[in-house]
């Protein structure tokens, strides 16, 4: 019985014990290291049983530090139908009135099976590099935890989604994307629906 209890505690933590190279960005307790953006409020986010919960809104939550090259692991869930969120990458630390997907990068989080999303552009589905690079195949698990492992290394952006590589993009191949920063904040979006994050952890190559 004790052995089972120890295993549960390890799995429940923000970063599994074997991932010693990863540093938690979300500590599983509070919002230390995060700041609201785009009109969002800290009150839009809470921590419950080690899970970061975002309620429906129109803002986003940003790290207080900027990062360049890294591997980012994000485990997330959409608790309601037609959920919509995203992970922002390399966002400049500026005040803007538009989504970071328009001046940085976003990896889409979406309820791909939602009735509201049956006629979207390929790059709008979950796991895609929004606006630019559609995911290679559908990997979304409705009502369950999903994991992105996102690599940003120079011009390369790679997304491994629930264990499968779905994006392998070169920023220089897209004229608009090529102009965007190679360093910036990391962000989590609350976009009109609730979203939950169980793990947000990073392995940094450069800052």
Image: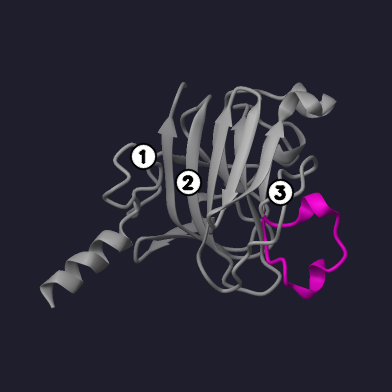
Residue extent of the magenta highlight: 109-126
Q: What crowding class fits label 1: few (fewer than 14 Cα within 10 Å), some (14-19), or many (20 or more)? A: some
Q: What crowding class fits label 3: few (fewer than 14 Cα within 10 Å), some (14-19), or many (20 or more)? A: many
How far apart in space, not on screen, are marks 1 and 3 (Cα)? 23 Å
How far apart in space, not on screen, are marks 2 and 3 (Cα)? 15 Å
Q: Look at the picture and state if 84 lies above or below 204.
A: below
Q: Are marks 2 and 1 in contact (CB under 8 Å)?
A: yes
Q: How many marks?
A: 3
- Residue drawn where x is 81% and y is 70% of the image: 116
Colouring of the image: one colour
Q: What residue is shown with label 1?
A: 22
- Residue drawn where x is 36% and y is 51% of the image: 30
Secondary structure category for the residue under label 3? loop
Secondary structure category for the residue under label 2? strand
Image location of residue 7, percent across then percent down? 23, 66
- Residue drawn where x is 32% and y is 45% of the image: 19
Q: What residue is shown with label 2?
A: 73
The quadrant where residue 150 appears? top right
Q: Are marks 1 and 3 in contact (CB under 8 Å)?
A: no
Label number found at residue 128: 3
**Drawn side of residue 132 relative to residue 82, left or right:** right
């Amino acid at each position: 019985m004790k052995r089972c209890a120890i295993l549960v505690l390890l799995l429940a933590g923000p970063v599994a014990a074997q991932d010693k190279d990863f540093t938690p960005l979300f500590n599983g307790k509070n919002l230390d290291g995060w700041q609201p953006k785009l009109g969002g409020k800290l009150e839009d986010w809470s921590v419950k049983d080690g899970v970061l919960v975002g309620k429906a809104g129109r803002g986003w939550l940003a790290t207080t530090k900027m990062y360049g090259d890294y591997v980012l692991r994000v485990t997330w869930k959409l608790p309601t139908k037609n959920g919509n969120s995203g992970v922002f990458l390399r966002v400049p630390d500026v005040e803007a009135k538009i989504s970071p997907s328009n001046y940085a990068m976003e990896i889409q989080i979406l309820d791909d099976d939602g009735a509201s999303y049956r006629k979207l552009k390929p790059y709008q589905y979950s796991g895609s590099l929004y606006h630019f690079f559609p995911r290679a195949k559908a990997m979304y698990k409705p009502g369950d935890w999903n994991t992105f492992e996102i690599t940003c290394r120079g011009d390369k952006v790679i997304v491994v989604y629930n264990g499968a590589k779905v994006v392998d993009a070169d920023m220089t191949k897209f004229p608009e994307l090529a102009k965007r920063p190679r360093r910036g904040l990391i962000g989590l979006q609350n976009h009109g629906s609730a979203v939950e994050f169980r793990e947000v952890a990073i392995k940094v190559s450069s800052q």
